[in-house]
Amino acid sequence: MSIADMTKRVTLLDPPPQDPSKAPIENVLELTPVVDLGQDVFTNTRPLWHPPGARGIYGGAAIAQSLSAAMRTVPADFAVHSMHCYFVLAGDSEIPILYHVERVRDGRSFITRTVQARQRGRPIFTTTLSFSRVGSGGAKTLSHAVPKPERSLPEDTIPGTVKALSDAGGGPFESRKAGIVNRTTANAEGKKVRRHFRARGHISEEGGFQAHLSALAYVTDSYFIGTVSRVHDIPRFSSPAELEKLLKALKNPSDLDDEDITRALKELKEEEAADLQRRIEGALNDATNEKNRKEQKEVGMIVSLDHSIYFHNPRAFRADEWMLSEMESPWAGEGRGLAIQKIWSKDGVLIATCTQEGVVRLKQDKSPLSKM
């Protein structure tokens, strides 16, 4: 099939029916080998999600599918321990993606791969991954880890419930807010945003530990760079009406269902109400009110630039069980921001540490000096 033909299709081949024996995230991240183009070339089997307000596809999909592609070229006794990614161009959800894997090095203890995701022959995403042989560190090793914060797991009213895959998509992950540490401090760098999340359904035994790693990689991009504006008490969307308008304009809303939309709108309204309450409590006089109006900030652009994941215990968790994420932002400036994320398993094992830098620009009274 020519590049011109590819631009007319959402996927290179017609997607097969959803596999009910697998979790929704396994279906979302399924890859198809493209043997006509090479031994290590893969494509997305199903349409990819374009989040509301985003410039392109959900970055977590490119991250997770690149990891899945690389893992197909690595022996089963090796597990990924680090992944360094760059978002080059916004991905188009209406065009197939080709994932090209390069076998950079195969050593006795470590294996290196690079993956380039391409559309229309141009790279939109690139990553370098390192895999280590299980047990290669020896019998004696140094060991320490940041403990999991004391947080109660979300209530599971109907344990084991699997939403029907035919129901308007059935989002592959569910999440619950778990509070903000130092919520009222004036220091943005001192706040920590916490959230529980897990893959819906039950990840199949056939998927192995690799399926759990891909699922984890997928969700690490969720809410991440938004931490920078969140710790400044600036909502990603200026109003529920703006978010609702963007949600209705989704190209391929297969990863988002009515429950997710309802929760997003509810959370935004709650954040606005809390922000209004803080403004009222802090309004000591008319002069203060006027100052607040002049200093009011609104997000103009949030775009991820790079994303790194360090996988600490690749076989010590299940992505379909509740995990806890803690995100913070140690720095922002020059129209960019940095976010750091730690993720623990249900049992309290630190399973990943992530970093992400992105463009975080506010709406300006004057035009910026440069554009993306």
Image: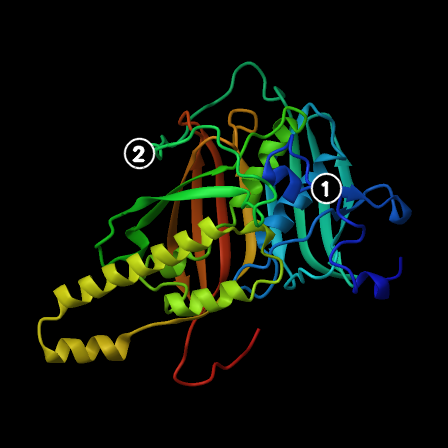
In the visual, does 242 lie left or right of 22? Answer: left
User: At 11% across and 79% down in the image, what residue appears?
Assistant: 286
* Residue 315: image tag: none
Whether tag 1 and tag 2 are in contact, CB under 8 A, the answer is no
Q: Nearer the viewer, residue 5 or 101?
A: 5
Picture coordinates of residue 140, whole percent (x, y): 52, 15
Q: Quadrant of the C terminus?
A: bottom right
Picture coordinates of residue 53, whole percent (x, y): 51, 66
Residue flagged by tag 2: what amino acid is it? Arg
What residue is shown with label 1? Answer: 17
Q: Is residue 158 above or below residue 67?
A: above
Q: Nearer the viewer, residue 153 or 110?
A: 153
In the visual, does 134 lie left or right of 43? Answer: left
Name the mark nearer the viewer: 1 or 2.
1
Picture coordinates of residue 245, whole percent (x, y): 47, 69
Quarter holding residue 290: bottom left
User: At 37% across and 68% down in the image, what residue appears?
Assistant: 239
Secondary structure under the numbered disc 2 in the rendered image: loop
* Residue 151: image tag: 2
Quarter holding residue 360: bottom left
Mark 1 or 2, nearer chain start: 1
Q: Is residue 104 above or below residue 361?
A: above
Secondary structure under the numbered disc 1 in the rendered image: loop
In the visual, does 24 lie left or right of 99? Answer: left
Task: Please say which color scheme the image uses.
Answer: rainbow
In the visual, does 163 lie left or right of 132? Answer: left
Q: Is residue 223 visible?
A: no
Q: Residue at the left extreme?
A: 285
Check disc 2: other Cα within 10 Å, few if <14, some if 14-19, many if 20+: few
